[in-house]
Amino acid sequence: MKKILFVLVCAFAVLSASAQDKKLTLNVGFLFPNTLNAMIGYEYPLSYGNAVEIYGEVGNHWQKPTCCRFWKGYYWDGGLVYKQRLVRYKNGMLRFRLGPQFGATQKKFFLGVEAGFEYSYVFQNGWEFSLIQKNNVNFLHGDTFRNGLLIGIKVPI
């Protein structure tokens, strides 16, 4: 009985310590031109380090002069991103991100495509640090190109 219990505890520990868990992602950063961005998402792992993420984000493309027009250029969007693993390191990996997005800015809807790279570093407790380089191409409104860096964390759920 003790051996069976020991085997079950070891199997549970191995399975729960995996870096291939579903994750809640939280990212913030700066995009060019003059845009603050915050993103929340849900990452579902696939085989060989690949993943799919569904996300939502809000941002603010501020105008000049900043004092009275800071919140005039806000936007929100959401999308689905496929993450293809390019390189795997001991405690991290580099992925290529690609997927469609949709949203609205100043009462104008848009469609777009997101592409970029993501580097993730896994800590011992299963949390991850992520650095994302984003490139967005949006259609049907004036804010066509956005690119920049986001930093964040991924929490296993």
Image (cartoon, grey):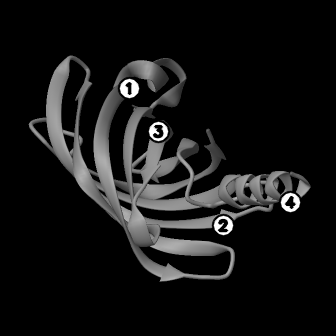
Measure the alpha-carbon separation of dots 2 and 1. Answer: 31 Å
The Cα–Cα distance between marks 4 and 3, rounded to whole angstroms, is: 41 Å
- Which residue carries the number 2 mark? 121
Residue 32 visible in the picture? yes
Looking at marks 3 and 1 on the same chain, the residue that comes earlier in the sequence is marked by 3
Question: Is residue 152 shown left or right of residue 54?
Answer: right
Query: Circle 3 — which element?
Result: strand
Q: What amino acid type is highlighted by mark number 3? A: Gly
Other-residue count near label 3 (Cα within 10 Å), few / some / many at <14 / 14–19 / ≥20: some
Q: Do the residues labelled 2 and 1 touch (CB within 8 Å)?
A: no
Hey, which residue is sitting farthest left in the picture? 140
* Mark whose residue sits in front, 4 or 3: 4
Residue at mark 3 to residue at mark 2: CA–CA distance: 17 Å
User: Mark 3 highlights which residue?
Assistant: 41
Q: Is residue 33 left or right of residue 38?
A: left
Q: Position of residue 30 (x, y in %)?
A: 51, 49
- Disc 3 + disc 1, Cβ < 8 Å: no
Residue holding disc 1: 74
**Residue 81 locus on image (x, y percent):** 31, 51
Query: Which residue is the extreme one toward the front?
Result: 1
- Residue toward you, 18 or 1: 1
User: Residue 132, percent across and down?
Assistant: 50, 60
Numbered badge on residue 3: 4
Residue 62: tell me if it is visible: no
